[in-house]
Image (cartoon, rainbow, N blue to C red):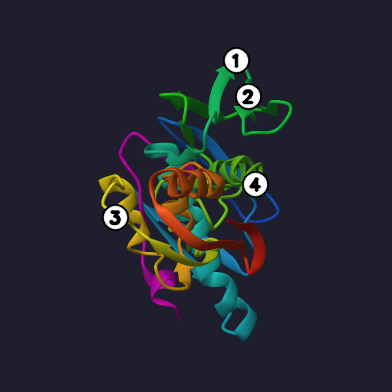
């Protein structure tokens, strides 16, 4: 028997549980609302005060597998109607924002059109600072499913991390594409300090990260700056191994 199946379920004094034999549903009522579920016929429920115990009808492999599942489902119902469930999602991206209009959740996710989603009954959605979405409710399955639907509208991508993610979600990042620069630059004493520091990284062929090129605006901007302020001989710039610019 699983340890989860052996543990008992307790609920607050303000809650109540009405259990019955299948196929009649088991109802749980609390401050957050009411939930009902039809349990598997291989398990039964016994209640003593505010403590509920889930038991097996017979000892076999199927009943053993169902026992822990049904106990967890009953526990989720009790926790839901007493304290409720909540999931927080964060939107990362330029121009990404969310807004709640009545029963509709409107998402701006970089598409040519806004994404509108209808908020199910029993679910409460709150938007904080336009980029944080809080989904709450008393049904754990419903809260998790609607949160997953929101995330699926723009899943986080691994390069810049843009998209919709759970607040505690870890997104594995990948290294972006690199720019290969082959150059022989002779820096004169008239070069600005910023260019002198930059050319230190490109005096010999090698791989240069794209974020360094962006500091100059573009490869062409760097080439123009090099030729206007320095004595450059055989300045050859390649993008991903392909010739891009040669001076």
**Rounded to the nearest whole Å, what is the CA distance between mark 4 and mark 1?**
20 Å
**Among numbered discs 3 and 4, the one appearing first in the sequence:** 4
The residue labelled by disc 4 is 152
Q: Nearer the viewer, mark 4 or mark 1?
A: 4
| Residue 25, above or below 205 | above
Q: Residue 116's spot in the image, x, y percent?
A: 69, 26
**Rounded to the nearest whole Å, what is the CA distance between mark 2 and mark 3?**
47 Å
Q: Residue at x 51, y 49 (%)?
A: 223
Q: Nearer the viewer, mark 1 or mark 3?
A: 3
The residue labelled by disc 3 is 197
Q: Is residue 10 left or right of residue 35?
A: left
Q: Which mark is residue 101?
A: 1
The residue labelled by disc 2 is 106
**Rounded to the nearest whole Å, what is the CA distance between mark 3 and mark 4?**
44 Å
**Among numbered discs 1 and 3, the one appearing first in the sequence:** 1
| Residue numbers of the magenta segment | 1-17
Q: Which mark is residue 7?
A: none
Question: Residues at badges 1 and 2 in contact (C-beta under 8 Å)?
Answer: yes
Question: Residues at badges 2 and 3 in contact (C-beta under 8 Å)?
Answer: no
Q: Nearer the viewer, mark 2 or mark 3?
A: 3
Question: Residues at badges 4 and 1 in contact (C-beta under 8 Å)?
Answer: no
Q: Residue 246's spot in the image, x, y percent?
A: 61, 58
**Rounded to the nearest whole Å, what is the CA distance between mark 1 and mark 2?**
7 Å
Q: Residue 99's spot in the image, x, y percent?
A: 55, 21
Question: Residues at badges 1 and 3 in contact (C-beta under 8 Å)?
Answer: no
* Farthest top residue in view: 102
Q: Quadrant of the N terminus?
A: bottom left
């Amino acid at each position: 028997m699983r340890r989860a199946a052996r543990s008992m379920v307790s609920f607050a004094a303000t809650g109540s549980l009405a259990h019955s034999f299948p196929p009649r549903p088991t109802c749980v009522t609390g401050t957050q609302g009411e939930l009902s579920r039809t349990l598997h016929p291989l398990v039964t429920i016994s209640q003593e005060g505010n403590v509920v115990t889930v038991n097996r009808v017979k000892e076999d492999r199927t009943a053993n597998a169902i026992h822990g599942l049904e106990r967890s489902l009953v526990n989720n119902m009790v926790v839901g109607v007493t304290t409720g469930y909540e999931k927080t999602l964060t939107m990362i991206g330029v121009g990404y924002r969310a807004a709640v209009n009545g029963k509709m959740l409107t998402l701006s996710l970089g598409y040519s059109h806004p994404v509108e989603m209808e908020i199910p009954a029993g679910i409460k959605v709150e938007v904080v600072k336009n980029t944080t979405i809080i989904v709450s409710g008393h049904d754990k399955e419903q809260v998790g499913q609607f949160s997953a639907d929101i995330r699926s509208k723009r899943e986080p991508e691994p390069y810049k991390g843009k998209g919709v993610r759970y607040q505690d979600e870890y997104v594995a990042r990948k290294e972006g594409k690199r720019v290969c620069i082959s150059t022989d630059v002779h820096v004169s004493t008239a070069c600005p300090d910023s260019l002198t520091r930059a050319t230190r990284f490109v005096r010999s062929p090698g791989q240069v990260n794209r974020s360094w090129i962006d500091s100059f605006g573009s490869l062409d901007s760097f080439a123009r700056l090099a030729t206007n302020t320095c004595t450059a001989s055989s300045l050859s710039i390649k993008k991903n191994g392909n010739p891009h610019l040669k001076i």
